Amino acid sequence: MAETVSSAPGGHGAHAGETRRDFLYLATAAAGAVGAAAVAWPFIASMNPAADTLALATIDVDLAAIQVGQSITVTWRGKPVFIRHRTAEEIATARAVPVSDLKDPQTDEARVQKAQWLVMVGICTHLGCVPGGQKTSDVKGDYSGWFCPCHGSHYDTSGRIRKGPAPTNLLVPDYRFTNDTSIRIG
Amino acid sequence: MTSVQWKNPVVRWVDSRFPVFSWLHHEYNEYPMPRNCNYLWSFGAISMVMLVTMILTGLFLAMHYTASTTTAFTSVERIMRDVNYGWLIRYVHMNGASFFFIAVYIHIFRGLYYGSYKQPREILWMIGVVIMLLMMATAFMGYVLPWGQMSFWGATVITNLFSAIPLVGEAIVTWLWGGFSVDNATLNRFFALHFVTPFVIFGVVVLHVAALHAPGVGSNNPRGIDMKGPQDAVPFNPYMTVKDSFAIVLFLIVFLGFTFYVPNYLGHPDNYIPANPLVTPPHIVPEWYFLPFYAILRAINFNVLFIDAKLGGVIAMFGAIAVLFVLPFIDRHPVRSARYRPLYRKFFWILVANVIVLGWVGAKPAEQPYVAIGQVATFWYFFHFLVILPWLNFVERPDPLPTSIAEPVLKGGGRLAAGAATAKPMEKA
């Protein structure tokens, strides 16, 4: 055994011995790093949304009672969702805008499933404030849609960013019509 | 370290096995302080008193507070109305946060004026910047706990800053929240973190003090020259213990004056409205001690190359602190104290005024002319650290330095030790 593990520094066998020791150091360090990551992962993952939080991620909304030109706000995943029954004029305005004029180019058709129903998350894409414009008395901004008072972002009647610091359009969540007058969000 | 012969046999027995009495004697009794330190040197001790005040009041508040979105707001109101002396403990904690920042900001500006970050105190200063960052995180999370409108929307805006990070931003924000918005999971973890971070701060403060008391370091002084010998120093006790105690009492008078007479002056009335995730207050402002940084965040409202405005603002805000962290390597002028740097002294006061302007802009809505003023002030902040200070390294001719600390104090240095009268800038004692 003493023959195989040379401990004489600088001796003929030293090079082979050091190489093997280096390997053991590296292997130990690698195993330690993997182990540390394995220990850290459950703690980090525990901070992600829990199963019950995820389970609340779907809601059904009945649209039958919403009149033309009226908006409602529902809560989905703790966030406001704006649902607007748009007027023909609002739809026409939104569709008349050339896509090249937009900061975040997107056609109105791509943002709705049925032209009169606009469904989107009511969170400003800048820093998360709730824009005004749901009530008739609210300030609706320069494009008659929604206006965020925090840092002055203006959204049009399709919820697209037109002016101000927000980088993107108001988010359209995943939703589908379960029948003609109700939707399931999430 | 001179060994002390303790008279009490119990003390002697303990000290020979675990020399805690000798350590305390060395660090807080005989520890030599420059004899010319003014009252600005008391703000370290004042900050320590505030940290202990915050930990103590916070501990007792935690016995009554409940971290749940349905009960957090009412539990705070219960503390105010029903818990014995709850109003006192909460108002001390609430105003204590502000006065802790006042003390620390004065402490930092003192360091800037007298060059306390320069060789050999670079690490001492960098540990201090870490303490400031930890304090900011702690104060931010603490402000969320009462679950008022400003709590909720402040938390929403600040956590959304992380969504500016490319690719992983949204995932990080969801992870921070533990959900899809600031909600119960967020409040719970903020409470847990707000409870533990003060003890982390305490630990880093121990490192800060250890770095100060390290051999060959010690306290800076208004002249920014090293102590040459015992004639330049006074023992910490009783000179500094008495002086610091007096400063602490004066500071506490102002602090408690606010606490008793205008306890909500430094807060925002909207935080007495329970949090409502569906209604954003028309005008969100952070606590006053974050206003200069908030102004820097909002100043970047334009894209810089491939960096969009949102990410640019976040980079600028964190950059404003990062630049302090590397300050010892930017300002390499050999003279420490602004007293002997006529140019730096002027730019120092311009910087102070600039930071006050930033704070004022941070409290205003994001409209003109405030946005433009904020942009100019943000530019100047970085220009000061990244251009003016390196430029002064080359061009500033300092006024003549005194030969020792004792010489100007004792008018001609009557009691100077032999051979101790020649001092050069940054020379080791």
Image: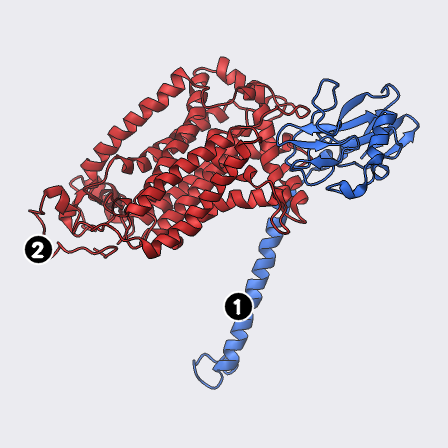
Q: Residue at x 59, y 23 (%)?
A: B149
Q: Residue at x 64, y 30 (%)?
A: B184
| Type of the residue with mark 2 | Ala
- Distance from Cα at disc 1 to Cα at disc 2: 56 Å
Circle 1 SS class: helix
Chain where mark 1 sits: A
Q: Residues within 10 Å of mark 2 (few under 14, many from 20)?
A: few
**Chain painted in blue in the figure:** A
Chain where mark 2 sits: B
Q: Position of residue B262 (x, y in %)?
A: 42, 17
Position of A61 relative to B235 (above/below):
above
What residue does disc 2 label?
B418
Colour of chain B as rendered: red
Indicate left or right for B314 with B401 as reference: right
Position of B144 relative to A22 (above/below):
above
| Type of the residue with mark 1 | Tyr
Q: Nearer the viewer, residue B300 or A17?
A: B300
What residue does disc 1 label?
A25
